[in-house]
Image (tube, rainbow, N blue to C red):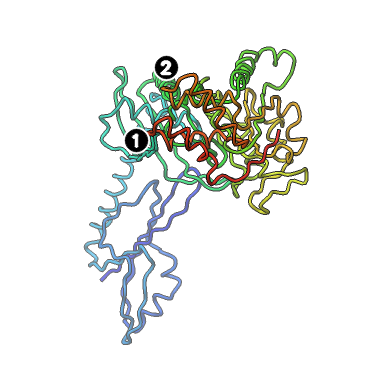
Amino acid sequence: MIIIYVSLSKYQNWSSTKSYIFLSVFSIMPSSNITDYIGSEMFDSPKLCSVWYDGAIRVVLNSMTDMTCNLGGGNEKMHLLKHATVVAVSSNYVSKVVGLVSLSLASIVIDETIGLIKRYFWQNYVTELEVSNSDKCYHWLLQWISKYNEHLLHFSVTTVCRNTESGHATSKFDYEPSSGEHMFKYKGHTIRVKRDRSSMLSSEYGSRPYETLNLSIWGRNRQVLNEILEEARLYAMSVMELGTTLMVPSYDTWHNFGEPRIPRPLSSVILDEGVIENILKDIHDFVDDQSWYLERGIPYRRGYLLYGPPGCGKTSMIMALAGEIKYNLCVLSLNDSKMSDDQLIQLMGEVPSKSFVLLEDIDAMFANRDGKTVIEGSTKVTLSGLLNALDGVVSSEGRILFMTTNYVDRLDSALIRSGRVDYKQYIGTCSDYQLSQMFIRFRPEGTIDDKSRFVKDVRKYSKPVVPSHLQEFFLLHRHKELNYVFEHINDLWQNVQDIQLTE
């Protein structure tokens, strides 16, 4: 009887994987001597032969991953090495086993040869484009592929929910190519798409999924892939122009938040006469004067500070301005406990083009130069870190920043100095002009006399009126007669705390 012991061991380096297969033939000794035999040096050093080859081993033997043998007259057990195979055969089967190994080696050689040929043609006759999910183009390509290749059979779905201004909830499904390989036709060319999201990317800001999108085409002309990129970009831009895109931080970059919002008409935000018009003109002047800034070596950035009591329309005006000039709105919360100075600087240095950056309620973060927050430990951002992010060497060019505050007197002077804040505007409680314009907007059936009466009746109470409260008042009584509205003007101040005015 012959025992054929097959041991597979591997070592790896960066260039290849090598495998050794050792076949050792041993004569069976008396059972009383088996223990000594197995423990001998002969067992650890196979004698018969070794074969070195590239690739994976395909030796088809009687596989047993965990073999148990009786040793001697006792019940001692010995578990052979994992992935080892022990086959008991008679000596005349040795040639058959060797032949089987030879066939396996021949199969491996053929596979390796085919692999070399495929790699050669892939490297020399296939044009490939790789985009990672850290690049904006990644999401553009996914949108474009999903839109123009609806026949793809393998896809993933995302449910998008949103509330309309009327208060109704809507939802829809967004489809994207799933992980794996896909094929589609583009202008007569077969495009192979491979989406891989099997790894994680770690940085000082945390870990996030790392995904890649590979587009490949037969031939050595990259023009087709360039055309796909351009079409994807134009399609993404057209989608953004349908509404105002909100963007929020995602690790160290910006990420779209939901679907583009329907642009809010500028006329729907009623502020004191000339306020919106003057800010809009200033923004247009800034956008048109890029070369003027560059010629004089002035940083091409613009900062606006809107201050005043809450509910007076600061954020609403910013949303309407973004919709008016077709800009995105990047919303940045410094209260995020995960936000750090380095991350803030990174985000401010990568603000997408044609975007407003909004820092709301900046007074809730920093009261003075010591950089301490109102809620101790609520954020890692310091005042010096914020100042560097606003106008440091890495701050993006062409950026338009809006900061809002309810208490301008609490802000450090360094934060709102010229160069960081170029335009300051007080947004306060309703003037007579606002009262009359909001009355016309919500009660268009009223006459000029009704408008004047409404303003006079409100002023009889000698109380300030916040635009948000006035809008709520009109919504509450939208189905009532005008006389009822006049009789219940006092409802404007129900459950309203005293308003602190700061100008």
Q: Amino acid at mark 1?
A: Asp
Q: Quadrant of residue 362?
A: top right
| First-in-chain label (2 vs 1) | 1
Q: Position of residue 271 (x, y in %)?
A: 58, 26
Residue at horizontal 60 percent and vertical 20 percent from the top: 273
**Label 2 to label 1, Cα distance in Å?**
29 Å
Nearest to the observer: residue 119 or residue 295 = 295
Q: Quadrant of the N terminus?
A: bottom left
Disc 2 packing (10 Å; few <14; some 14–19; many ≥20): few
- Rendered view: 311 above or below 78: above
Looking at the image, which is closer to me, 223 or 384?
Answer: 384
Q: Would you name the residue on which mark 1 appears?
A: 174
Asked whether the beta carbons under mark 2 and mark 1 sit within 8 Å of each other, the answer is: no
Residue drawn at (68%, 31%), measured in percent from left and top? 394
Q: Residue at x 74, y 38 (%)?
A: 409
In the rendered image, residue 225, in percent from the top left (x then y), is placed at 41, 21
Q: Position of residue 4 (x, y in %)?
A: 31, 65
Q: Residue furthest bottom?
A: 73
Q: How many marks?
A: 2
Mark 2 or 1: the one toward you:
1
Q: What element does badge 1 sit on?
A: strand
Disc 2: which residue? 223
Q: Residue at x 31, y 71 (%)?
A: 67
Q: Is residue 225 visible?
A: no
Q: Give left or right: position of 304 versus 324.
A: right
Picture quadrant of residue 282: top right
Report helix, strand or loop for mark 2. helix
- Identify which amino acid the numbered label 2 is placed on: Gln
The image quadrant where one finds the C terminus is top right
Residue 349: where, in percent of width, then height? 63, 32
Residue placed most toward the observer, 285 or 175: 285
